[in-house]
Amino acid sequence: MFPHDRGAVPLADGRTRFGVWAPAPDRLELCLRRPSRIETIPLERDERGVALLERADAGPGTEYWYRLDGTRDRPDPVSRELAGGVHGVSRVVDPAAFPWTDGGWQGLAMPDLILYELHVGTFTPAGTFDAAIARLPYLLDLGVTALEIMPVAEFPGRRNWGYDGVSLYAPHSGYGGPEGLRRLVDAAHRAGLAVLLDVVYNHLGPEGNYLREFGPYFSDRYRTAWGEGYNLDGPGSDEVRRYLAGNAAYWIDEFHLDGLRLDAADRIVDPSPVHLAEEIGAAVHRLGEGAGRRTVVIAEIDSNDPRWVRPREVGGFGLDGHWSDDFHHAVHVALTGERGGYYADFGGVGPVARALGRRYVHDGGYSAFRRRRHGHPADDVPGDRFVICVQNHDQVGNRAAGERLAALVEPAGVRLAAAILLLAPYVPLLFMGEEYAERSPFLYFVSHGDPDLIEAVREGRRREFAAFGWRGEVPDPQSEATFAASGPRWERAGEGEHAAVLALYRDLLRLRRALPLLRPGAAEPAVRHDEKEEWVAMRLSGGDQTLDAVFNFSTGLRDVPGTAHPADLLLDTDDPRYGGAGQVRRTDRGLALPPRAAALLRSRR
């Protein structure tokens, strides 16, 4: 599946093979940078538009590009490294030269994933792969098991979320390029941490996008939210699919990544008998099995469609998991009361209970926001197929002011959100800084070079926020100050209430590792709730143990009946160690919880 004859591939005999699919231009030339000149080599193509050439004098480090019709110099669509950014030139890279030390690493299964989403450019002051390595001991001590890195494919400028990438095979040069990413993955594996990468196959960014000049990569038959969709079923589509599925395989093969998160996967328009996502999942799993390690593919979807994670044998796509936004929305609205935009479908604790017990809130019923039925039941799908969160880059950064949860609710609400996330029987995802209640915003930022595009982005953000009723000035995405404001302030993790929240996250994650019933898929949750009293209770049973988790979303003291008795109180979020007042009490009926508090109890048969 991986197109080893595309791009510049150093061979064992010291030669380099150049391969490119370029049926569009009438004339095609390969340009090699020499010390005092540019060597230009005419290329012949086969009937499919593929040109292959081997050279003995173009080893690693050689800069090259393609000249189209004698006038347009363009980087290789399969550049492993770019020099000079998205408008620059390609550089030959030898992936076999890196001294990997992770030979014994076997990866992690879905139930063992505790994901930590980070943006390389803001995760550290230096904003590089190498700088992120220094924070791995902190993440290991926190208790997460896997990094989920926001997209790193080369994008315009130095500031971007990564979803404007245009050279899918080239890790961003400002982050440290391909060797920097390899060093980060190798160091993470040595520390016992898996690494997943967010990849974007639903569109290409608007600046530096030269693919259409090479061939029919895009289709005018299908539109996405970002413009033309990829040509996945028309003439030439075999090469387009090869380009995308091959890219997924490339990250697993050449960078030893443990898995991928497919951005907005259900926005990939593909009417083919085998959907691109299914093709990607099969390729990634095959490569992992061949290397003796587990690999996973997780889709971001908005459709609440369990086919994405059902086995291929029963008509599913065979992916390992998908993001489940209903959980976030239900908890967010129960804590904040916000009802704008898609939050209109949520309110009270009923949706929280439904998301906790049945995977989805919308599983075929009517959605007022969409004004139609939405979703499909997923009760038969194991819990380890669903990735949940209370914060992520989208839900924070796509707010007008980029507010994190700690800036929207009181400390008790932050602690309650942490508890329901980490006690739920699904795969949890944390967003960088969440674990110590970071209050600095995470904003949307770009550094485009086209003035018209910059203004279009500004106007697009203003229109988007109007649907939520958010008012006031929207931070300028192009401003460097917007980017500078978006990084975690790590010194806060050791201060006051931030340190107390960090202690809670560490203890919750410790319990999650120690209690087998909390492992996703280990037990089906039995969930009760009281809409008027605003509490939710969940029971997990297995072997000789029962766990009862209770969550009080109200702003008053609540007596939650029916918890197992006698039982050990393993943790409560109102503990003074976590910044609470120590007011959780046992009662004859069950457990009395102060406002916005949660507790976990264990009983034995």
Image (cartoon, rainbow, N blue to C red):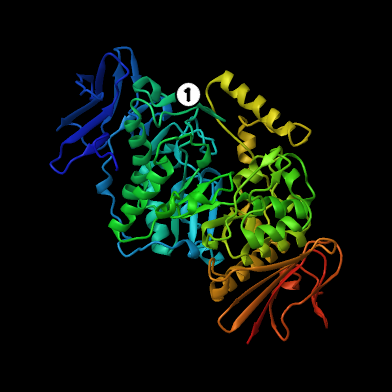
Q: Quadrant of the C terminus?
A: bottom right
Residue 64 percent across, percent down from the top left:
28, 27
- The residue lying toward the viewer, choosing from 267 and 392, is 267
Going by the image, does 10 lie left or right of 300? left
Q: Quadrant of the N terminus?
A: top left
Residue 124 in view: no
- The residue lying toward the viewer, choosing from 322 and 581, is 322
Going by the image, does 393 lie left or right of 83? right
Neighbor class of circle 1 (other Cα within 10 Å; few <14, some 14-19, many 20+) is: few
Residue 476 in view: yes
Residue 536 percent across, percent down from the top left:
74, 65
Residue lying at the far right of the rendered structure = 556
Going by the image, does 534 lie left or right of 486? right
Residue 29 percent across, percent down from the top left:
24, 19
Task: Say if 572 sits above or below 433 in the image.
Answer: below
Q: On the image, which quarter does residue 477 sit in?
A: top right
Label total for image: 1
The local secondary structure at tag 1 comes to strand
Q: Residue at x 39, y 30 (%)?
A: 233
Residue 176 percent across, percent down from the top left:
41, 42
Task: Say if 470 sits above or below 501 in the image.
Answer: above
- The residue lying toward the viewer, choosing from 319 and 557, is 319
Q: Amino acid at mark 1?
A: Arg
Q: Residue at x 37, y 23 (%)?
A: 216
Residue linked to disc 1: 221
Task: Say if 445 sits above or below 211 in the image.
Answer: below
Going by the image, does 471 lie left or right of 436? right
